Amino acid sequence: MNQRLLGSIMVLFVFIFGLSGISLAGKPAAPVPEAAPAAKQVAVDTNGDGKPDRWEYYESAELVRIEADTNSDGKIDELAKVEKGKIVSAEKDSNYDGKIDRWMQY
Ligand SMILES: [Ca+2]
Ligand SMILES: [Ca+2]
């Protein structure tokens, strides 16, 4: 038996052994389906008047967005985008006319 043939047999043996190993192990367990990361909204009453004036939006338990009503007129006048725990940009309606008039990048 020459070396080359021996090598081929060894490869074949390992191949068959490998296959039987797979069949013995059965099908790999199906990955547990993760629940779709539901966006979550949290309303916060920052001034204690009983009405929420700040809304925090979470995706996969990570804060991604903050909206705030800073003059308690029921309209959002501040928006902030959050990435990795840091505010990256913000928009503000500083004269409360319902139009964003200030943009900030951080
Ligand atoms: Ca409030
Ligand atoms: Ca407002």
Image (cartoon, rainbow, N blue to C red):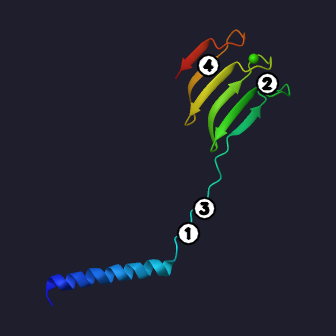
Residue hosting label 3: 32
Expressed as whole percent of the image width and height from the top left, the position of residue 104 reads 56, 18
> Mark 1 or mark 2, which has the lower sequence index?
1
> Mark 3 or mark 2, which has the lower sequence index?
3
The structure residue drawn at horizontal position 67% and vertical position 14%, both measured from the top left corner, is 93
Residue hosting label 4: 91
Amino acid type at circle 4 is: Glu
Front label number (3 vs 2)? 3
Q: CA distance from mark 3 to mark 1?
A: 8 Å
Which quarter of the picture shows residue 41? top right
Amino acid type at circle 3 is: Val
Binning the other alpha carbons within 10 Å of mark 3 as few (below 14), some (14 to 19) or many (20 upward) gives: few
Which quarter of the picture shows residue 48? top right
- Of the four image quadrants, the one with ligand 1 is top right
Q: CA distance from mark 3 to mark 4?
A: 40 Å
Residue hosting label 1: 29
Amino acid type at circle 1 is: Ala
Q: Answer whether labels 1 and 4 touch (C-beta < 8 Å).
A: no
**Element on which disc 4 rests:** strand
Residue hosting label 2: 47
> Mark 1 or mark 4, which has the lower sequence index?
1
> Mark 3 or mark 4, which has the lower sequence index?
3
Q: CA distance from mark 1 to mark 4?
A: 47 Å
The structure residue drawn at horizontal position 80% and vertical position 17%, both measured from the top left corner, is 73
Mark seen at residue 85:
none
Relative to 77, residue 9 above or below: below
Q: Is residue 63 left or right of residue 72?
A: left
The quadrant the N terminus occupies is bottom left
Q: Answer whether labels 1 and 2 touch (C-beta < 8 Å).
A: no
Front label number (4 vs 2)? 4
